[in-house]
Protein backbone atom coordinates (compact mmCIF):
# COMPACT_ATOMS: atom_id res chain seq x y z
CA UNK A 1 0.00 0.00 0.00
CA UNK A 2 1.29 3.45 -0.83
CA UNK A 3 0.37 7.02 0.14
CA UNK A 4 -1.75 7.43 -3.02
CA UNK A 5 -4.02 4.62 -1.81
CA UNK A 6 -4.30 6.07 1.71
CA UNK A 7 -5.46 9.39 0.26
CA UNK A 8 -8.46 7.65 -1.34
CA UNK A 9 -9.79 7.00 2.19
CA UNK A 10 -9.29 10.56 3.42
CA UNK A 11 -11.07 13.91 3.24
CA UNK A 12 -9.19 16.23 0.91
CA UNK A 13 -9.78 19.51 2.77
CA UNK A 14 -6.52 21.35 3.51
CA UNK A 15 -5.88 24.07 6.05
CA UNK A 16 -2.83 26.30 5.82
CA UNK A 17 -1.42 29.33 7.58
CA UNK A 18 1.49 31.67 7.04
CA UNK A 19 4.45 31.83 9.44
CA UNK A 20 3.50 35.47 10.04
CA UNK A 21 -0.11 34.72 11.08
CA UNK A 22 -0.98 35.14 14.74
CA UNK A 23 -0.88 31.83 16.61
CA UNK A 24 -4.27 32.65 18.11
CA UNK A 25 -5.84 32.68 14.61
CA UNK A 26 -4.33 29.27 13.86
CA UNK A 27 -5.60 27.83 17.15
CA UNK A 28 -9.12 29.14 16.45
CA UNK A 29 -8.98 27.59 12.94
CA UNK A 30 -7.87 24.25 14.39
CA UNK A 31 -10.65 24.27 16.98
CA UNK A 32 -13.37 25.46 14.59
CA UNK A 33 -12.52 22.74 12.03
CA UNK A 34 -11.74 20.01 14.57
CA UNK A 35 -8.25 19.43 13.18
CA UNK A 36 -5.00 18.72 14.99
CA UNK A 37 -2.56 20.05 12.40
CA UNK A 38 -2.14 22.88 9.93
CA UNK A 39 0.48 23.16 7.20
CA UNK A 40 2.56 26.33 7.32
CA UNK A 41 3.11 27.76 3.82
CA UNK A 42 5.33 30.64 2.73
CA UNK A 43 5.39 31.82 -0.90
CA UNK A 44 3.80 28.54 -2.02
CA UNK A 45 6.30 26.30 -0.20
CA UNK A 46 5.72 24.07 2.81
CA UNK A 47 7.94 25.51 5.55
CA UNK A 48 6.45 23.93 8.65
CA UNK A 49 3.68 22.15 10.53
CA UNK A 50 1.68 23.46 13.42
CA UNK A 51 0.02 20.94 15.71
CA UNK A 52 -1.46 21.24 19.16
CA UNK A 53 1.84 19.79 20.41
CA UNK A 54 3.77 22.83 19.16
CA UNK A 55 1.09 25.19 20.50
CA UNK A 56 1.32 23.67 23.98
CA UNK A 57 5.15 23.78 23.84
CA UNK A 58 5.30 27.48 22.96
CA UNK A 59 2.69 28.33 25.62
CA UNK A 60 4.62 26.35 28.23
CA UNK A 61 7.80 28.19 27.23
CA UNK A 62 6.05 31.54 27.48
CA UNK A 63 4.58 30.67 30.89
CA UNK A 64 7.96 29.66 32.27
CA UNK A 65 9.47 32.89 30.89
CA UNK A 66 6.78 34.89 32.69
CA UNK A 67 8.39 34.03 35.99
CA UNK A 68 11.71 35.37 34.73
CA UNK A 69 10.27 38.65 33.50
CA UNK A 70 7.57 40.24 31.31
CA UNK A 71 6.13 38.24 28.43
CA UNK A 72 3.96 38.95 25.41
CA UNK A 73 0.26 38.02 25.46
CA UNK A 74 -0.72 34.98 23.37
CA UNK A 75 -2.31 37.28 20.77
CA UNK A 76 1.20 38.55 19.99
CA UNK A 77 2.75 35.12 19.35
CA UNK A 78 3.15 34.25 15.67
CA UNK A 79 2.99 30.85 13.99
CA UNK A 80 6.69 31.16 13.12
CA UNK A 81 7.62 30.90 16.81
CA UNK A 82 5.61 27.72 17.41
CA UNK A 83 5.77 25.72 14.15
CA UNK A 84 7.85 22.63 13.48
CA UNK A 85 10.32 23.80 10.83
CA UNK A 86 10.94 21.57 7.78
CA UNK A 87 8.60 18.74 8.80
CA UNK A 88 9.04 15.28 7.34
CA UNK A 89 7.10 15.01 4.08
CA UNK A 90 5.58 12.16 2.13
CA UNK A 91 5.24 11.67 -1.61
CA UNK A 92 2.48 9.89 -3.49
CA UNK A 93 4.48 6.73 -4.29
CA UNK A 94 5.90 6.35 -0.77
CA UNK A 95 5.19 2.96 0.81
CA UNK A 96 3.02 3.08 3.93
CA UNK A 97 5.68 1.31 6.01
CA UNK A 98 8.27 3.87 4.93
CA UNK A 99 5.88 6.69 5.89
CA UNK A 100 5.08 5.11 9.24
CA UNK A 101 8.78 4.64 10.03
CA UNK A 102 9.53 8.24 9.00
CA UNK A 103 6.79 9.61 11.23
CA UNK A 104 7.85 7.49 14.20
CA UNK A 105 11.58 8.22 13.83
CA UNK A 106 10.95 11.98 13.60
CA UNK A 107 8.30 11.90 16.35
CA UNK A 108 5.85 13.57 13.96
CA UNK A 109 2.17 12.79 14.18
CA UNK A 110 1.48 14.46 10.83
CA UNK A 111 3.22 14.64 7.46
CA UNK A 112 2.37 16.86 4.50
CA UNK A 113 2.04 14.94 1.23
CA UNK A 114 3.76 16.62 -1.69
CA UNK A 115 3.71 16.05 -5.41
CA UNK A 116 6.96 17.77 -6.28
CA UNK A 117 6.58 21.03 -4.36
CA UNK A 118 2.76 21.03 -4.53
CA UNK A 119 0.90 20.30 -1.30
CA UNK A 120 -1.64 17.50 -1.87
CA UNK A 121 -2.79 16.55 1.63
CA UNK A 122 -1.72 15.91 5.21
CA UNK A 123 -1.58 12.43 6.68
CA UNK A 124 -1.68 11.61 10.37
CA UNK A 125 -0.53 8.46 12.12
CA UNK A 126 -4.26 7.78 12.61
CA UNK A 127 -4.80 7.92 8.82
CA UNK A 128 -1.91 5.49 8.34
CA UNK A 129 -3.26 3.12 11.01
CA UNK A 130 -6.80 3.29 9.55
CA UNK A 131 -5.53 2.46 6.05
CA UNK A 132 -3.35 -0.40 7.29
CA UNK A 133 -6.28 -1.83 9.28
CA UNK A 134 -8.54 -1.64 6.20
CA UNK A 135 -5.90 -3.44 4.15
CA UNK A 136 -5.47 -6.16 6.79
CA UNK A 137 -9.25 -6.64 7.06
CA UNK A 138 -9.52 -7.00 3.28
CA UNK A 139 -6.69 -9.55 3.20
CA UNK A 140 -8.31 -11.42 6.09
CA UNK A 141 -11.63 -11.65 4.21
CA UNK A 142 -9.83 -12.96 1.11
CA UNK A 143 -7.99 -15.60 3.11
CA UNK A 144 -11.17 -16.72 4.88
CA UNK A 145 -13.00 -17.00 1.55
CA UNK A 146 -10.12 -18.97 0.10
CA UNK A 147 -10.02 -21.36 3.06
CA UNK A 148 -13.80 -21.76 3.05
CA UNK A 149 -13.74 -22.84 -0.59
CA UNK A 150 -10.65 -25.03 -0.30
CA UNK A 151 -11.28 -28.36 -2.09
CA UNK A 152 -12.08 -31.07 0.46
CA UNK A 153 -10.01 -33.67 -1.38
CA UNK A 154 -6.92 -31.49 -1.79
CA UNK A 155 -5.04 -33.60 0.73
CA UNK A 156 -5.58 -36.76 -1.36
CA UNK A 157 -3.79 -35.49 -4.47
Image: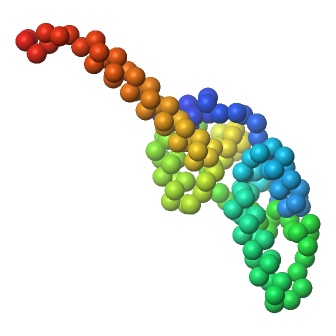
Judge from the rendering whether residue 17 lies leftward or rightward of residue 99; answer left or right. right
Compared to residue 114, the image places residue 51 above or below, namely below
Q: Position of residue 100 (x, y in %)?
A: 50, 48
Tell me the residue at 81%/50% (across/down). Answer: 31
Q: Residue furthest bottom?
A: 68
Tell me the residue at 89%/85% (across/down). Answer: 70
Judge from the rendering whether residue 9 lies leftward or rightward of residue 61; answer left or right. left
Q: Place residue 150 in its image quadrant.
A: top left
Q: Give 147 or 71, whichever is nearer the viewer.
A: 147
Q: Place residue 18 in its image quadrant.
A: bottom right
Q: Position of residue 71 (x, y in %)?
A: 88, 81
Q: Position of residue 38 (x, y in %)?
A: 75, 51
Tell me the residue at 61%/29% (across/down). Answer: 8
Q: Quadrant of the C terminus?
A: top left
Q: Position of residue 25 (x, y in %)?
A: 89, 56
Q: Is residue 23 visible?
A: yes
Q: Give 157 or 48, whichever is nearer the viewer.
A: 157
Q: Give 66 or 96, whichever is nearer the viewer.
A: 66
Compared to residue 142, the image places residue 90 above or below, namely below
Q: Place residue 23 in its image quadrant.
A: bottom right
Judge from the rendering whether residue 76 lies leftward or rightward of residue 108; answer left or right. right
Q: Residue furthest left?
A: 156
Which of the colour schemes (rainbow, by chain, secondary structure, one colour) is used?
Answer: rainbow
The total of numbered circles placed on residues is: 0
Q: Is residue 91 visible?
A: no
Tell me the residue at 63%/44% (across/down). Answer: 123
Compared to residue 133, the image places residue 15 above or below, namely below
Amino acid sequence: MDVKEILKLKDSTLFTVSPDDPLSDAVVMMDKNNIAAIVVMDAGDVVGMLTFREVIAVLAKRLSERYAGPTLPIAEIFVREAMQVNPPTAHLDMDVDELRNLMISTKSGHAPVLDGKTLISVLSLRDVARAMLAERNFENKLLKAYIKHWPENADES
